[in-house]
Image (spheres, grey):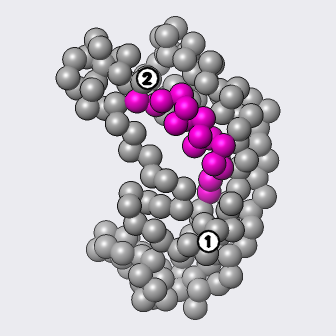
Amino acid sequence: MIGAPQPLVLAKPAAIDTAQAARYFGARGEPDDRTMTLLETCAMPLLAAATPRAVWLEADTAALAEAGILRGGDVMKHLENCPQAVLLAVTLGPGVDAQIRRAGVGAVYKRQGQRAGRAGRRRSRSRAAPVGRKRGKVFDRAVFARLR
């Protein structure tokens, strides 16, 4: 059985922890001034555009596999002795996606890539999946429709 999606109330933070964001970008120790300046410049517009939403549901793992929601051997192996699972879908909203597109995430990597040469250009392509998609595969449209 797959349960009904339940909304999860999310509060937008008053500020973004830029030191933590730098760690997510791979900074070890104290981030350099250029990284912190970039993060501080981007933080407020992203926070203003954010409309965080989340939805969760509880389901039998067998039902999720039958419905095609759980695909692949790795996830099934991980859930081998779990009769139930909780699925969580979270978004910061389309405003954040638009801000990222406008800012050109690739441009950040290109600037850094000018120093790194060819490797930087390869990283300039965004790997972000469109809203409601996971790297080209649409999962449960009903779940994602409730997030919008």
Secondary structure beneath label 1:
helix
Residue picked out by circle 1: 143
Q: Amino acid at mark 2?
A: Val
Residue drawn at x 22%, y 26% is: 119
Q: CA distance from mark 2 to mark 1?
A: 32 Å
Does residue 48 appear to the left or right of 99 in the view shown? right
Q: Amino acid at mark 1?
A: Val
Q: How far across and down, in percent of the image, does residue 100 sit?
A: 54, 35
The tag earlier along the polypeptide, 2 or 1, is 2
Between 145 and 53, the one nearer to me in the picture = 145
Residue drawn at x 74%, y 34% is: 48
Between 13 and 60, the one nearer to me in the picture = 13
Decide: few, some or many residues near mark 1? Use Cα within 10 Å; few <14, some 14-19, many ≥20. Answer: many
Is residue 101 on the magenta stretch? yes
Between 37 and 1, the one nearer to me in the picture = 37
Residue picked out by circle 2: 108
Q: Quadrant of the N terminus?
A: bottom right
Give the magenta part as a residue range.
90-106
Q: Is residue 87 above or below residue 39?
A: below
Q: Is residue 8 above or below residue 41?
A: below
